[in-house]
């Protein structure tokens, strides 16, 4: 048991929750210390141990007695007094939520393991049970529109296949452990769901609310600095946003797709009461002044623009932009300055930015910079200037 308590997997998940999920929760701007939280599918309680100290009460439920035993031992070993772990399945939710009230409900790495009917019922049950000030945290759900199934089969376009084809192609996957887990279930179809089937905006549309209402309830999403450091940019994510914008602008579809669904890992916080205005739009920017011969792609397919200390990179920022998000590669070193027109608005050490990264995804580290107010209607050129002896590998930057 001691080996399990100190496992690398547990520590990794604990660190993720403490360093990235906790700050994301704080962005909601509520007094969590007076709130009751429920985590569905708590497993070995890594998030329980990291997040319970933020709340008045924290309840975790799971259907696996072995994981739950380890989770209880983890909670006890860390002296956490306000957490309770219970052996319950998602099917028990209606009864549980009818008997007890929770202010925050976590569905973290859960939805993708449920059948379609279970997903829709779970989403609706959780949402309906929240009080007016309540929050629903959706986390680590792999996105159906991703071109590669990183989560389960490791096969390209697998998550877009009709169910009949997906079942027939299980044995084509090179992920042997996944194949065996799928075939171990009562049916191959159930095995696919229990071992992770991707999720899309359609699930939330049917389980929670129409997509034209969704962004009014979304108060924190997966484009924040914390989420960019937890989940590094993948090559297709900017393209997804371009597609969403094209669908809307061209009239191809009147079905709006919130930008949260542009990323591979779907993650965000929904407030039961709608907000006055939605989150600002993400806009990727074109880097200029970069030598095209110094552009390469990292292992996630993202183009990395090399900028030496004797050169600069520039982006043009729209007047309404309030934040600039910069990603740097693991090969970057030294320092750099940000210039707003001719004015220096920031001086940053690469190591300080990298410190925000957990170290699991060492390919990229991200920093979000608050921008000055631009003159009305006037775009501003922002310059990224490495200092003497420095080198930057820049990911495609974006503004909000």
Image: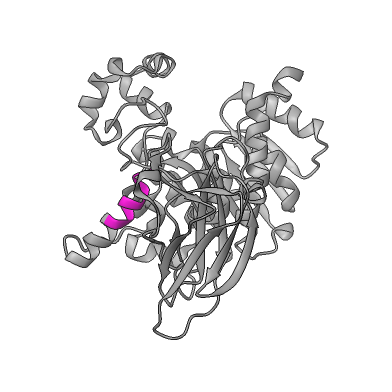
**Relative to residue 378, is residue 25 depicted above or below?**
above
Residue at 38% x, 57% y: name it.
Answer: 259
**Residue bounds of the magenta highlight:** 235-242
Classify 358 as above or below 204.
above
**Toward the viewer: 107 or 86?**
107
Q: Residue at x 24, y 64 (%)?
A: 248
| Residue ID at (66%, 29%) | 10
The location of residue 38, given as percent across then percent down, is 62, 46
Location of residue 240 in the rendering, given as x and y in whole percent from the top left corner: 31, 51
Along the line of sight, which residue is nearer the eye, 275 or 39? 275
Position of the N terminus, as image quadrant, is: top right
Depicted 258 relative to depicted 201: above or below? below
Q: Is residue 119 above or below residue 212?
A: above
In the image, residue 241 lies in the stretch drawn in magenta: yes
* Residue 170 image offset from top left, x and y in percent: 30, 19
Q: What secondary structure do most residues of the magenta stretch adopt?
A: helix
- 364 or 160, nearer to the observer: 364
């Amino acid at each position: 048991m001691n080996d399990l308590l100190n496992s690398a997997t547990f520590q990794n998940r604990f660190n993720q929750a403490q360093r990235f999920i906790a700050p994301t929760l704080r962005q909601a701007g509520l007094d969590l210390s007076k709130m009751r939280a429920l985590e569905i599918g708590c497993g070995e309680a890594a998030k329980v141990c990291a997040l319970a100290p933020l709340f008045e009460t924290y309840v975790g439920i799971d259907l696996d007695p072995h994981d739950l035993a380890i989770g209880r031992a983890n909670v006890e070993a860390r002296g956490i007094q306000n957490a309770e772990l219970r052996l319950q399945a998602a099917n028990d939710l209606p009864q549980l939520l009818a008997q007890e009230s929770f202010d925050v409900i976590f569905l973290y790495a859960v939805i993708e393991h449920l059948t379609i009917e279970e997903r829709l019922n779970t989403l609706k049950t959780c949402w309906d049970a929240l009080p007016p000030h309540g929050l629903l945290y959706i986390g680590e759900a792999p996105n159906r529109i991703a071109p590669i199934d990183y989560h389960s089969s490791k096969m390209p376009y697998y998550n877009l296949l009709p169910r009949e084809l997906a079942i027939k192609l299980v044995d084509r996957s090179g992920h042997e452990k996944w194949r065996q887990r799928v075939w171990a279930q009562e049916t191959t179809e159930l095995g696919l769901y229990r071992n992770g089937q991707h999720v899309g905006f359609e699930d939330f549309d049917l389980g929670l609310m129409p997509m034209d209402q969704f962004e009014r309830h979304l108060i924190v999403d997966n484009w924040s600095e914390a989420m960019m450091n937890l989940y590094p940019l993948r090559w297709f994510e900017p393209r997804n946003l371009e597609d969403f914008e094209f669908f809307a602008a061209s009239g191809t579809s009147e079905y709006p797709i919130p930008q949260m669904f542009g990323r591979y890992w779907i993650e965000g916080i929904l407030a039961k009461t709608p907000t006055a205005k939605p989150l600002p739009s993400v806009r990727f920017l074109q880097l200029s002044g970069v030598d095209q011969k110094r552009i390469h792609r990292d292992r996630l397919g993202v183009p990395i623009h090399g900028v030496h200390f004797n050169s600069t990179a520039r982006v043009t920022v729209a007047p309404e932009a309030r934040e600039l998000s910069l990603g740097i590669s693991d090969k970057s070193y030294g320092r750099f300055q940000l210039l707003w027109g001719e004015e220096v608005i920031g001086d940053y050490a690469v190591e300080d930015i990298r410190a925000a990264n957990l170290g699991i995804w060492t390919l990229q580290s991200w920093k979000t910079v608050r921008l000055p107010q631009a003159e009305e209607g006037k775009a501003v050129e922002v310059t990224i200037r490495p200092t003497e002896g420095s080198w930057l590998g820049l990911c495609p930057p974006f503004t909000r």
